[in-house]
Image: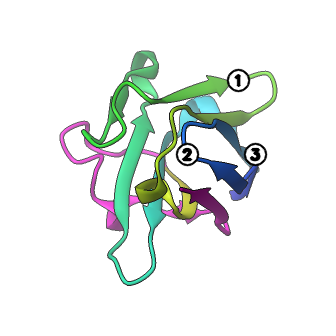
């Protein structure tokens, strides 16, 4: 399984971006998928997840109501739509996937087997 993340860039506060994570080697619908981010000097942080089962979605409190994860099975791609961006959203964003993430443990990045290369999001104030 390979993941290819894209869509990062520079945006002003309040702006929007859509990140994409293209999956190859396996149908994305068979994977639990998530987005994590790493800001300079900070630990990897959970952003959101979309699970195999019924496409249930979960979000970090810091992004709830602003970010939306979706899955397009026909394109084998998962998206992270980010609205109302803030400077504190600045980070490298990584998509991750796993075949069987416990639904109570989706925030634990170590459980995900596959990772994309990361895409940089910079939000200017």
Name the residue that disc number 2 marks.
Answer: 13
Asked whether the residues under the numbered discs 1 and 2 touch, taking CB atoms below 8 Å apart as contact, a structural biologist would say no
> From the viewer's perspective, is the residue at label 2 or at label 3 nearer?
2
How many marks overall?
A: 3
45, 102: nearer the viewer: 45
Tell me where residue 116 sits by quadrant: bottom right
User: x, y (%) of residue 107?
Assistant: 28, 51
Span of residues in magenta? 98-125
* Image position of 6 (left or right of 93): right
- SS category of the residue bearing label 1: strand
Q: Is residue 34 left or right of residue 65?
A: right
Report how far apart the C-alphas of labels 1 and 2 lie in the structure: 28 Å
| Percent of width and height locating residue 54 | 43, 15
Q: Nearer the viewer, residue 38 or 17?
A: 17
Outermost residue on the left side: it is 104
Q: Which residue is mark 3?
A: 22
Q: Does 31 appear in magenta?
A: no
Q: Residue 71 sits in which quadrant?
A: top right
């Amino acid at each position: 399984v390979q993941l290819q993340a894209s869509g990062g860039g520079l945006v002003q506060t309040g702006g929007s971006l859509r990140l994409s994570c293209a999956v190859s080697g396996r149908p994305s619908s068979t994977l639990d998928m998530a987005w994590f981010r790493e800001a300079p000097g900070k630990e990897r942080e959970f952003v959101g997840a979309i699970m195999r089962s019924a496409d249930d979605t979960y979000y970090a409190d810091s992004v709830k109501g602003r970010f939306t994860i979706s899955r397009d099975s026909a394109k084998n791609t998962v998206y992270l739509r980010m609205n109302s961006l803030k400077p504190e959203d600045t980070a490298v964003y990584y998509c991750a996937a796993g075949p069987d993430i416990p639904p109570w443990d989706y925030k634990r990045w170590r459980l995900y087997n596959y990772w994309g290369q990361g895409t940089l999001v910079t939000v200017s104030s």
